Image (cartoon, rainbow, N blue to C red):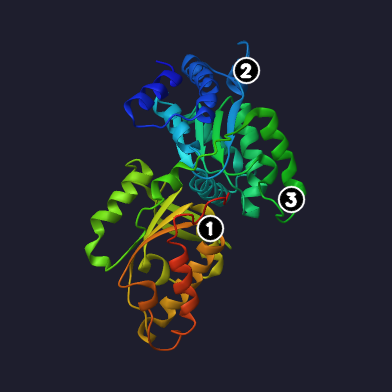
Amino acid sequence: MTLTEIYEAQVAAGTLRADPAQHAVLPGLEALRVWVEANANRKVGLFAGLFAKPITPPKGLYLWGGVGRGKSMLMDLFFANLTIAQKRRVHFHAFMQEIHHGLHEARKKNIEDALAPVADAVIRDVRLLAFDEMQISDITDAMIVGRLFEKLLAAGVVIVTTSNRPPEDLYKNGLNRALFLPFITMLRDRLEVVELESPNDYRQHRLTGAQVYFHPAGRVQGEIAAIWTDLTGGAPGEALRLPVNGRITELPRFANGIGRASFWDLCAKPLGPADFLAIAAAVRVLILEDIPQLSASNYNEAKRFVTLIDALYEAKVRLICSAADEPERLYIEGSGSFEFERTASRLREMQGADWGKGSD
């Protein structure tokens, strides 16, 4: 079956809702699937050999559009039905963290071009790389990604990626952005850039009218687990490690743009505004569990919680949480309780059915 036929079968079965914008993307993905399956074991690009005629891979795909339009679903459909072993799907942040680790190890060995063995290791294992949520906010990533992609594409690796923004908006207003511009040109030249123009926000539809704030926390583990399963399609999730000012901030579970953590995972650690801004930039929905009663006894944790909510609010991240009590009763006495009124108001606003609509 072609991807279009598989998609239409899922629509007929009621597991997907027909969307013309999604449907229009499928023939391009099908053509990529056919080519990759036919050529997965043939040497391409730089590895074609001295006497073999090199095979030119087709352009990859850069699929961008608003949150909840089905970009990740389409990539997952493509990936799941690609019958080769040499494939990998990974969140872009997590992939870049692996690259940074590889560079660190190569530099310890005094390798002159530390990126070469790192890229070679990727090339050795895959013919198809699928990235979810490409975004560049870190100057270190911005300086590395161009050379890395150049090596991958020259070796014949086919790249499929999703993003919430067009290539021209990557690393927008970033430090030394002029050095990053050739990478944008490369993306335009080597990948088909396609906007998914669906008017529907399917992730928002699943949450519209649904309860997103639960209390008391100890009685709702089943409800929270069911929401995670629904939003991630049953993915177990894995830790997302985000580089922040030369160190790593970790979100314990992440899948398909959905983050999951406990209050203590994020607010009991010495994290600051930069960490919470990085998390807010990386997720579209955050499930935050076990928010306790707040008071002078956990004042530092409460301050971090306020900062976290501010970051999520400004980024229009959809918040689903379990807490000890209603927002207005979380912090009712002690130093900081008066200032918490704004946070309680934001927590209440973020429960609205329309919260997050229109954000990118």
Q: Of marks 3 and 1, which one's residue comes earlier in the chain?
A: 3
Q: CA distance from mark 3 to mark 1?
A: 25 Å
Q: Which residue is mark 2?
A: 56
Where residue 148 appears, as percent x and y from the top left, is 62, 39
Mark 2 or 1: in front is 1
Q: Which mark is residue 316?
A: 1
Which amino acid lies under the numbered mark 3 shown in the image of this protein? Arg
Q: Residues within 10 Å of mark 3 (few under 14, many from 20)?
A: some
Locate the N terminus and report the quarter of the image it occupies.
top left
Q: Residue at x 38, y 65 (%)?
A: 265
Where residue 101 appears, as percent x and y from the top left, is 51, 50
| Residue contact between numbered discs 3 and 1, judged by CB atoms under 8 Å | no
| Residue contact between numbered discs 3 and 2, judged by CB atoms under 8 Å | no
Work out which residue is located at the far bottom of the displayed protein and give it. Answer: 334
Q: Which residue is mark 3?
A: 177
Q: Residue at x 62, y 24 (%)?
A: 59
Classify 220 as above or below 124: below
